[in-house]
Image (cartoon, rainbow, N blue to C red):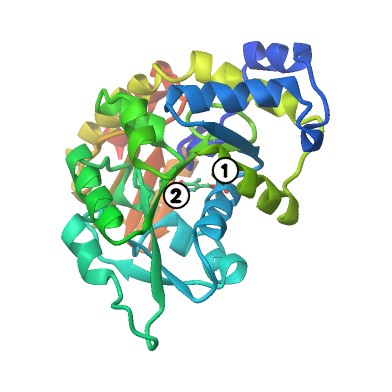
């Protein structure tokens, strides 16, 4: 089977497993796991931020950040297709007692004037606007990347209005590699950043939340309350360290593979509109003889797994377990359909 359902399906490579077995561990709830501490400071340094916090998932890092940046009754501004809004089980309401002002962005990306318009006036009838949350790359935008100056403009609006700015950077390294950016520019702008190690970077588990020392101290308390305090988590952190050392630059290969498959798809009658392929995600409309469901089944018969994300849309995600040979095989299958 060739797996395109998600970049979360990657399995640890022998090199990663060996690193995990050999790593030093301790009780991380007592701050005594050397591997966790190394991973946290490694990522904090990369982004020029003060501190990091290793958590079991990206949902948890996002939810902790939102909890720390807001007070009950507040409002969070984000794109209407944001993971924090549509894929975290209503967590903003459940965990932070806040509501969302969803914005219609361009492939998951919002702009400064939209943020300005979405801020509530200081009026007791209105929820107090407290936080802006961005996503880069944007999952439902087909792996779209923010234009960095747009983020800088949003930051200006946040500063003028005393709003915090969070980045759901589940796939931030995909954007950084695709656009040849400097991680420190992100660290400079955002109050908090969440990074997933368990997607295209290939680690089995884990995300890291980055911020100031004060913020991370608060986040550590919230992580404990959420049940995310782990003990010898260093085995997992070691996989994350290995991922950061070995699997960032190769994301460019996933992006190239995605473009090659996209080109083959675009020649087919049954492929309608496709979102621009900027990173490792392909999202396209299915038309003609197939529906998203029947095309997914057809692919499956030929040992290729894709996801129907709506009755008319298919998503394919590239990652490090998809080799050049598998991409060539996929293109052959597409040509034969
Ligand atoms: C995957 C993902 C997350 C976090 O997901 P978990 O499964 O909880 O680790 C957050 N944001 C985006 C955009 C994602 O794609």
Residue 251 relative to residue 232: left or right: left
* Residue 139: % across, % down: 38, 48
Q: Secondary structure at mark 2?
A: strand
Please name the residue shown 42% across and 42% down the image: 299
Tell me how many marks there are: 2
The vertical placement of 157 against 212, above or below, is below
Q: Are marks 1 and 2 in contact (CB under 8 Å)?
A: no
Q: Is residue 179 visible?
A: yes
**Residue at the farthest bottom position:** 125
Please name the residue shown 67% across and 45% down the image: 220
152, 311: nearer the viewer:
152
Please name the residue shown 40% across and 74% down the image: 128
Residue 136 relative to residue 154: left or right: right
Q: Around disc 2, counting alpha carbons within 10 Å, would you say few (fewer than 14), some (14 to 19), or many (20 or more)? A: many
The vertical placement of 307 against 26, above or below, is below
* Residue 287: % across, % down: 24, 57
- Label 2 C-beta lies within 8 Å of the nearest ligand 1 atom: no
Residue 7 relative to residue 179: left or right: right
The residue carrying mark 1 is 214
Mark 1 or 2: in front is 1
- Label 1 C-beta lies within 8 Å of the nearest ligand 1 atom: no
Q: Around disc 1, counting alpha carbons within 10 Å, would you say few (fewer than 14), some (14 to 19), or many (20 or more)? A: few
Residue 199 relative to residue 310: left or right: right
Q: Quadrant of the N terminus?
A: top right
314, 112: nearer the viewer:
112
Q: Quadrant of the C terminus?
A: top left
Residue 130: numbered disc: none
Residue 264, quarter of picture = top left
The residue carrying mark 2 is 307
* Residue 211: % across, % down: 50, 39
């Amino acid at each position: 089977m060739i797996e395109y359902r998600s970049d979360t399906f990657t399995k640890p490579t022998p090199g990663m497993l060996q690193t995990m077995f050999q790593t030093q561990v301790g009780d991380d709830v007592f701050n005594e796991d050397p591997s966790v501490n190394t991973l946290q400071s490694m990522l904090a340094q990369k982004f020029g931020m003060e501190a990091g916090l290793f958590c079991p998932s990206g949902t948890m890092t996002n939810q902790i950040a939102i909890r720390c940046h807001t007070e009950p009754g507040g409002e969070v501004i984000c794109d209407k297709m944001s993971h924090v809004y549509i894929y975290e089980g209503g967590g903003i309401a459940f965990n932070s007692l806040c509501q969302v002002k969803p914005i219609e962005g361009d492939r998951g990306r919002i702009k400064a004037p939209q943020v300005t318009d979405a801020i509530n006036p200081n009026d007791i009838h209105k929820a107090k606007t407290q936080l802006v949350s961005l996503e880069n790359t944007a999952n439902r935008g087909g792996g779209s990347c923010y234009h960095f100056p747009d983020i800088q403009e949003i930051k200006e609006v946040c500063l003028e209005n005393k709003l915090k700015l969070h980045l759901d950077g589940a796939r931030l390294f995909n954007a950084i590699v695709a656009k040849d950016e400097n991680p420190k520019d992100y660290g400079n702008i955002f109050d908090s950043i969440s990074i997933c190690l368990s997607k295209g970077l290939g680690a089995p588990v884990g995300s890291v939340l980055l911020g100031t020392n004060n913020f991370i101290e608060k986040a550590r308390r919230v992580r404990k309350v959420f049940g995310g305090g782990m003990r010898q988590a260093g085995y997992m952190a070691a996989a994350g360290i290995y991922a950061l050392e070995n699997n960032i630059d190769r994301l460019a290969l996933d992006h190239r593979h995605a473009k090659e498959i996209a080109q083959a798809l675009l020649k087919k009658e049954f492929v309608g509109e496709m979102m621009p392929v900027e990173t490792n995600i392909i999202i396209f409309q299915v038309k003609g003889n197939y529906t998203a469901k029947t095309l997914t089944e057809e692919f499956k018969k030929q040992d290729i797994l894709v996801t129907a994300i709506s009755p008319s849309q298919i998503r394919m995600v590239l990652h490090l377990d998809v080799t050049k040979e598998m991409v060539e095989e996929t293109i052959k299958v597409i040509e034969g359909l």
